[in-house]
Amino acid sequence: MKSSLLDARGARRRVWLRGVAVASAGMLTLCLPALVGVVNAADANAVDIDNFAFSPATLTVRAGTRVTWTNHDEDPHTVTSSDNPHAFASGALDTNGTFSFTFDKPGTYPYYCAIHPHMTGVIVVK
Ligand SMILES: [Cu+2]
């Protein structure tokens, strides 16, 4: 009598645990798009140098963000801060060359290519 009562409780507990497991799996599935979103957000810290232009020309990031430029052109380019003194200056980037800079302070950071000064871009740090 007493043992069958305990068995019933144990069975109920097992059913409850199975429910928790199913709910956890469901939450993991729901969270997956959010995790993918985080990965995509990392791409928002990238500037491509393509066809003699910075893309996006204006990039807005939060303070503390590390921005990476990648030169996809056959010609060398630089990522050179327009400020004096330069907040950052990459030097010549060859094809597939990258340059990274971490923007710690909020502000507007215009830059250009020192080899082709008509190439300009802006990093806005919030
Ligand atoms: Cu250039």
Image: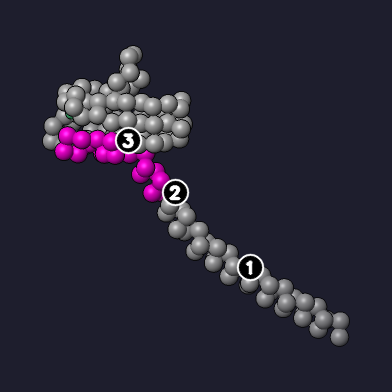
| Quadrant occupied by the N terminus | bottom right
Going by the numbered disc 3, the residue's amino acid type is: Thr
Which sits in the foreground, 114 or 126? 126
Residue 37 x, y percent position in the rendering:
43, 52
- The mark closer to the camera, 1 or 2, is 2
Whether disc 3's CB lies below 8 Å from ligand 1 is answered no
Is 31 rendered above or below residue 107? below
Q: Are marks 2 and 3 in contact (CB under 8 Å)?
A: no
Q: Quadrant of residue 2?
A: bottom right
In space, the residues marked 2 and 3 are separated at their CA atoms by 21 Å
Q: Is residue 94 left or right of residue 27?
A: left
Q: Quadrant of residue 93?
A: top left
In space, the residues marked 1 and 2 are separated at their CA atoms by 26 Å
Q: Which residue is mark 1?
A: 20
User: What's drawn in magenta, residue-wise?
Assistant: 38-57
- Give residue 58's mark: 3
- The mark closer to the camera, 2 or 3, is 3
Residue 88 x, y percent position in the rendering:
33, 22
Is 25 rendered above or below residue 119? below
What residue lies at 39% left-to-right and 36% top-to-bottom?
60
